Image (cartoon, rainbow, N blue to C red):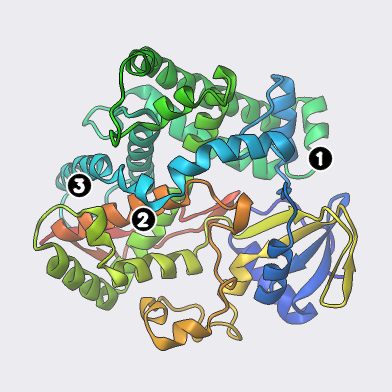
Amino acid sequence: MNACSPCQLAPSTIGTYLYKRGFHKKYGKIFKERLGPVTNLSISDPALVEEILRTEGKYPFRPPYQSWVLYNELYNRKGGTMTADGEHWKKCRSVMNPKFLRPKAVGEFVEGINGVVASFVDRLRLLKDATGDGEPIPHLPNELSKFTMEALGWVLLDKRLGCLEEHVEEKVQNFISSIATMFLTGHQLMIFANVHQKLNTKPWRNHVRSWNTIYEIAQDYIDERMKDVAERLSGDIKEGERVDFLTYLVGSGKLSREEIYVNITEVLLGGVDTAANSFSFLLYSLAKHTESQDILLEEVDRVLGGKVCSYEDLQRMPYLKAVVKETLRLYPPIPINARVMQEDTVIDNTLIPKGTIVLLNKYTMARDEKIFTNPDKFIPERWLRAEAKDWHPFSSIPFGYGARSCVGRRIAETEIYLATVGICQKFRMSVSDKFDIKPSVRTQLTPGPELPILFTER
């Protein structure tokens, strides 16, 4: 293996990931990289990534930010599906999987999500009219976060949170802003978080404050529903009747009250930011590539004929799914995933010692000209043509793979599918020439605070 760059401080711009692309071109598909006191192994070859992920043990270890671990220790929390590991992580994950990852279970949420989509389209129209023709809606990524929070709140709690009302409660914006701050400061504290904690630096204080706000608001929402959940569980739930996620968790009896609070909070905060960022990049891509937008509009009109989209309708929209796949290839929510090797492992004739942190560079793989034709171009058709079979299945894994993949993947995809359809039924989109997106990384890949998108009524 080759030695590589000097120590890199926590990155904040997409330029760092372009920089890593350059490293892989210079040093190859696998190289060592020193980050503060830790030496990592960076990999950008789909076959090697597959080998690592397919040979994971019973408890795949995805290293969380040290700041997350320190925060949980501060409040004596074990963490949930996002921040825990080992047997406790496995326990939490096994309880959540049936409700989140089975297609039939996800289909039960479509009607409710469609109601959220209708409210969001109304809010877009209100904001568009208030802004005026020819002007992008201000802070559109934040509005998309309100949509994903409302949709996920309904999925998790069977409750509309009021995120899309004309006048939104202050705690809604506090929750969204705290998520952004938590991820940003977590990124900043990636190195020497324990030192920041000891010195009580501003990034550490902001990190703790944002986590506290997230937990306080999430617990308020959960507590508001607990009485209704208890009443429902005390009665008879008919076979085949839809059961919301919170009722399912409480009724299973597999998690304590504290574990329910932690896991719903982590799913809510992770799902709001991930889905909103991906949705932002998708709308931007469609607005910028009107030829792809026209094809999608034709598919939506042909399949739906103006009616509300059902779960079955989604199965007849291959171009919609190709648009989402292509967006996630170009803009993976987490540009680099990571694992800690649980055993000494030989990959590509290289011994990777137990305990080594392996960085799986999804951003580099997805934009590698040796893997994808015209890798930096938005071409949804690549997922429809026969050539799609040529792409290595691990060359684009935006939600990860295996037991440690994103637990909310199907919910996030369904939200994005239905919201994209709802917007396409009502609007055409184009790009303003007044500014462009400014992608940055705060743990997750974000488009920046503004989107240069213009909406025109169809």
Residue at numbered disc 3: 121
Q: Nearer the viewer, mark 1 or mark 3?
A: 3
On the image, the x and y values in percent for residue 104 come to: 35, 49
> Which residue occupies the foreground of this view, 93 or 190?
93
Q: Earlier in the sequence, mark 1 or mark 2?
A: 1
Instruction: Give residue 451's mark.
Output: 2
Q: Position of residue 292 (x, y in %)?
A: 28, 75
Q: Could you tell me how far apart the alpha carbons at marks 1 and 3 are, in whole angstroms?
A: 44 Å
Vertical relation: 197 (above or below) 433: above
Q: Amino acid at mark 3?
A: Val
Element at label 3: helix
Q: Is residue 11 visible?
A: yes
Q: Residue at 15% across / 52% down in the picture? A: 308
Q: Earlier in the sequence, mark 1 or mark 3?
A: 3
Q: Is residue 221 left or right of residue 420?
A: right
Name the element at disc 2: loop
- Quadrant in which the C terminus appears: bottom left
Residue 192 numbered tag: 1
Q: Image point 23% across, 43% down: which residue?
A: 111
Query: Where on the picture, by quarter, is residue 305?
Result: bottom left
Provide the secondary structure element on which disc 1 rests: loop
At horizontal 27% and vertical 49% (from top left) the residue drawn is 137
Question: Vertically, is 241 above or below 109?
Answer: above
